[in-house]
Amino acid sequence: MNKLSWFIWHELKISLRNAGDTAVIVMFFLLIALLFPMGIGSSAALLTRIAPGVIWVAAILTAMLSLDSIFASDFEDGSLEQIVISPTPLILIVTAKFTAHWLITGLPLIFAVPIIGLIYDIPIKVFSLLLISMGIGTPILSLIGGLGAALVLGARRGGVLLALIVLPLLVPVLIFGTAAADAVFLGFSPKPPLLLLSAMLLAALAIAPSITTLAIRRALE
Amino acid sequence: MDCFISFPKLKCFTLKNFLRRWSSPDPKRSVIIISMEFNGKNILCKRGEKEVFSGLSIKLVPGEIIELHGPNGIGKTSLLRLISGISKPTHGTFYWSDGTVSEYPERHFSRITLIGSADALKPMLTVEENLYDWTWLNRPRPERSTIISALRVFGIDALADTPVRFLSAGQKRRLTLSRLLTVETNLWLLDEPTIALDSEAVSLLKKLLVKHCESGGMAVIATNNDMQIQNTRKVNLLSYARSRQHE
Amino acid sequence: MFNFLANPARFNQVTDRLMPATAGLAGLFLSIGIISALIISPPDYQQGDTVRIMYVHVPSAWMALFIYSFIAITSAIGLIWRHPFAHLSAQAAAPIGITFTILCLTTGSLWGKPMWGAWWVWDARLTSVLFLFFLYLGFMALNKAFDDPSRGEKSAAILALVGFINVPVIKFSVDWWNTLHQPASLLRADGPAIHSSMLTPLFLMALGFIFVAVCVLVTRIKVLLLKRRIRLMRINGGKLRS
């Protein structure tokens, strides 16, 4: 096992032993998705039509909930200082943290989507496109969200502030993630939005970890 | 024309360098202690925007211990953070005999161990896992036996499989101090190391410090209790204080 | 230029001398601009007198983008060369930029009701300007969120740089997407598509806005410099270091 995978495992161990962290996140996701039918009525056709958007909004809100903790506990207990002054490159640990965050909070959502799919009666073609767009899009939530979390380290009311600065940056993910699944309803090809989403993922992979290391160093200085 | 702005030195970024840092564990050179002097020249320290002390110069030769004294708020912890490289001095430089800290940060990081007031322990992980992961952060992958024997020195090897959340404050302190044994470094930076320790552990720490110095190591200890170790130089930060309340 | 002005004493000295002229120019351009926009320029053959909203709407949109770019550039300077003056100018510019963004959104909405029949439509140009508003808001909130002001300005500077991606998106949103908002009529490869009787008041207003923004910016920088000096005096026991 190399160093990167070891520290991904390190993060996973901490989250998995905080019993039910992942379960709470998935429940929150399902709950938001279940609130919409209660708010806007139970017209089956309407629910099917809005399902992709609802699922993406729920995914982004769920990410907001869990992002707070990605660096905050390490910042408070001094682990982040120990990481910064170790010879291990900071970007390796940041990458491990992002990966672990996605494995704990992003991946389970994709597995929870079928349940919502049944409730909203999503056609199978829309459903498969939704899964693909979630697969490409949820890592972006971890990357951009993690960058935001590093920026608000040590701030007052960090959670609200995090939402204020990260949500606008995540709107393109919402737009193209939903557009890919909506393409079936509208009769377009889903390829362009999926390609744009992939481009965003690649851009986020390229810039988010390095800018996050910069933000962390600034936070500790 | 004006020295308000100076260009930073950019480190050369090559693909080879990048791959080396990602694929292999840290280079072997970091494991060997080479006796070397550590210097700080004309240091100005700020806490936030408050200037705490200035004009401080320190010099550490192999085998030497410096005890930092002074009233609360004088900047003992701030100085340790500066030396460790977490924060950068507003003025002044820190350097080893073979180069400055800011030019070779990773080499500097492989030569220091900081035991701060925050314990950096994960309550959900066991004692052994905590020490193991910390050690691997700083060195090539450690052997389990190294970890266990370090715990044994501090008398907490029986707790190896206990999650840290069940430990007392003193036991946690012993665990953080056992880091000094798994990773060999030139310079130990200890922030109030004796807090929560019983007399047995304190004398153990002293013994370790003496041994560390005999093999060419150095230490900076921020404390107001005299550690009573031979060869210790005491520095009172009060004489460098900037603010009036300490004058 | 930046290097030269970054010394607070010199900044005050230079701007004190230039301020009356700048303020005078702002008043001059604005008054001529408003008269020619509201009275002299002809009504549009399709939009009638509603077109006069454009003389406020378009320059404020330009200013919103221009000031955000200014913030991004000064933030980059502040991060790379660690110069407090750069962060300070970014901080001073943000409220001005958000004011122009609000002005742009409000006038656009007032124009949209009679023309499009709705106060707001979800079109790419409008949405991206709305994000610009939230970016400004995030920048200002992050600046103020820390106990140690120097921490806030660094975090906010990083955010400003990341958010800069939005600026080209706003500029080209009317070309990339099929939008309700009309495409660019001025900065086009084949020359402006507006008659000069409307172009002149538009440029006069834009010049007026620029000079107003410069006046407010300089005043705000001065205020922030003084505030910083007072803060440093308070915490460092009367020593004046800047």
Image: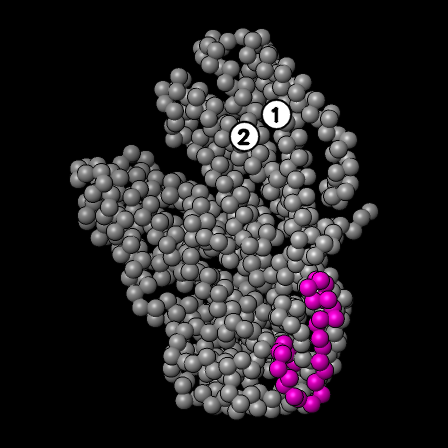
Judging depth in this view, the residue of C139 and A137 nearest the camera is: C139
Q: Compute the Cα span from label 2 to label 1.
A: 9 Å
Q: Which amino acid, by three-letter code, is at mark 2?
A: Phe
Residue B17 pos. (x, y %): 61, 65
Residue A182 pos. (x, y %): 30, 39
Secondary element type, mark 2: helix
Local packing at callout 2 (Cα closer than 10 Å; few below 14, some 14-19, many 20+) is: many
Which span is picked out in magenta?
B219-247
User: What's the colour scheme?
Assistant: one colour
At 38% from the left and 49% from the top, the residue drawn is A137
Judging depth in this view, the residue of B56 and A65 nearest the camera is: B56
Figure quadrant of residue C3: top right
- Who comes first in sequence, dot 2 or dot 1? 2
Local packing at callout 1 (Cα closer than 10 Å; few below 14, some 14-19, many 20+) is: many
Please name the residue that numbered disc 1 is placed on. Answer: C209
- Mark on residue A91? none
As for residue C116 lying within the magenta part, the answer is: no
| Visible residue check, residue A210 | no
Secondary element type, mark 1: helix
Q: The residue marked by circle 1 belongs to what chain?
A: C
Q: Which amino acid, by three-letter code, is at mark 1?
A: Phe
At 38% from the left and 73% from the top, the residue drawn is B124
At 37% from the left and 54% from the top, the residue drawn is A65
Residue A85 pos. (x, y %): 58, 69
Q: The residue marked by circle 2 belongs to what chain?
A: C
At 31% from the left and 68% from the top, the residue drawn is A19
Please name the residue that numbered disc 2 is placed on. Answer: C100
Residue B220 pos. (x, y %): 66, 78
Q: Quadrant of the C terminus of chain B?
A: bottom right
Kindly check if marks 2 and 1 are in contact, taking CB atoms under 8 A apart as contact. yes
